[in-house]
Image (tube, rainbow, N blue to C red):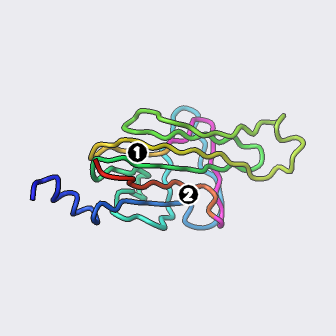
């Protein structure tokens, strides 16, 4: 058995998948940063097959070379704007955003709005993938876990 085959076998038979929501419990929004993107840490992990997602840092680290698929949903509350970008090794890939300024909310119910996106990426072993919140934005979550981040290995390469 060669090194690559041995490594593939050590990652749960090539099974890698995670799904997490922003808050472990309760409701609230992230803190707003005016100057930098903030890596989002999704704390309520419901699936982490292969242990590739780190709930302390918010970073998924590819355990093996392959095609992976990621999807995320970010929510805002009342007049807040939310925007997040999927990042691979410090390179922005795709973003999702929902602008909730004064003119877009003055006639609605001032409730929850959301944005979502997804991407399939070719990752090398050790590549890091995370979601970063844009400056001046917030993300909201509550007991129904409406802000989430998920990913899984489609197939090894």
Q: Residue 7's spot in the image, x, y percent?
A: 19, 57
Q: Nearer the viewer, mark 1 or mark 2?
A: 1
The residue indicated by pointer 2 is 22
Q: Residue 116's spot in the image, x, y percent?
A: 61, 46
Whether 136 is drawn above or below 58: the answer is above
**Which is more N-terminal, label 2 or label 1?**
2
Residue that sits furthest to the right in the current view = 107
The residue carrying pointer 2 sits among few (fewer than 14), some (14 to 19) or many (20 or more) residues within 10 Å by Cα, namely: many
Whether 5 is drawn above or below 66: the answer is below
- Please state if 109 lies on the left or on the right of 68 as rendered: right
- Residue depicted at x 49% and y 55%: 150
The residue indicated by pointer 1 is 129
Q: Nearer the viewer, residue 17 or 35?
A: 17
User: Residue 101, located in which quarter of the rendered image?
Assistant: top right
SS at circle 1: strand
The range drawn in magenta is: 132-144
Q: Residue 67's spot in the image, x, y percent?
A: 37, 46
Q: CA distance from mark 1 to mark 2?
A: 16 Å
Q: Residue 40's spot in the image, x, y percent?
A: 50, 48
- Please state if 59 lies on the left or on the right of 101 as rendered: left
User: Residue 54, located in which quarter of the rendered image?
Assistant: bottom left
Whether residue 138 appears in magenta in the rendering, the answer is yes
User: Residue 83, located in which quarter of the rendered image?
Assistant: top right
- Residue depicted at x 45% and y 66%: 47
The residue carrying pointer 1 sits among few (fewer than 14), some (14 to 19) or many (20 or more) residues within 10 Å by Cα, namely: many
SS at circle 2: loop
Whether 62 is drawn above or below 92: the answer is below
Whether 64 is drawn above or below 94: the answer is below
Secondary structure, magenta segment, majority class: loop
Whether residue 47 appears in magenta in the rendering, the answer is no
């Amino acid at each position: 058995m060669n090194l690559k085959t041995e490594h593939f076998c050590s990652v749960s038979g090539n099974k890698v998948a995670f799904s997490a929501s922003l808050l472990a419990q309760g409701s609230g929004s992230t803190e707003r940063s005016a100057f930098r993107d903030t890596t989002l840490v999704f704390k309520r992990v419901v699936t982490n097959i292969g242990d590739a997602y780190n709930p302390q840092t918010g970073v998924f680290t590819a355990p093996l070379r392959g095609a992976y698929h990621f999807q995320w949903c970010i929510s805002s509350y009342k007049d807040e704007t939310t925007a997040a970008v999927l990042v691979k090794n410090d390179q922005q890939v795709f973003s999702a955003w929902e602008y909730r300024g004064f003119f877009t909310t003055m006639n609605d119910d001032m409730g929850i709005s959301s944005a979502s996106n997804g991407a399939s990426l070719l990752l090398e072993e050790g590549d890091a993938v995370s979601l970063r919140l844009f400056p001046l934005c917030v993300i909201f979550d509550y007991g129904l876990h409406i802000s989430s981040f998920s990913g899984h290995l489609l197939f090894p390469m």
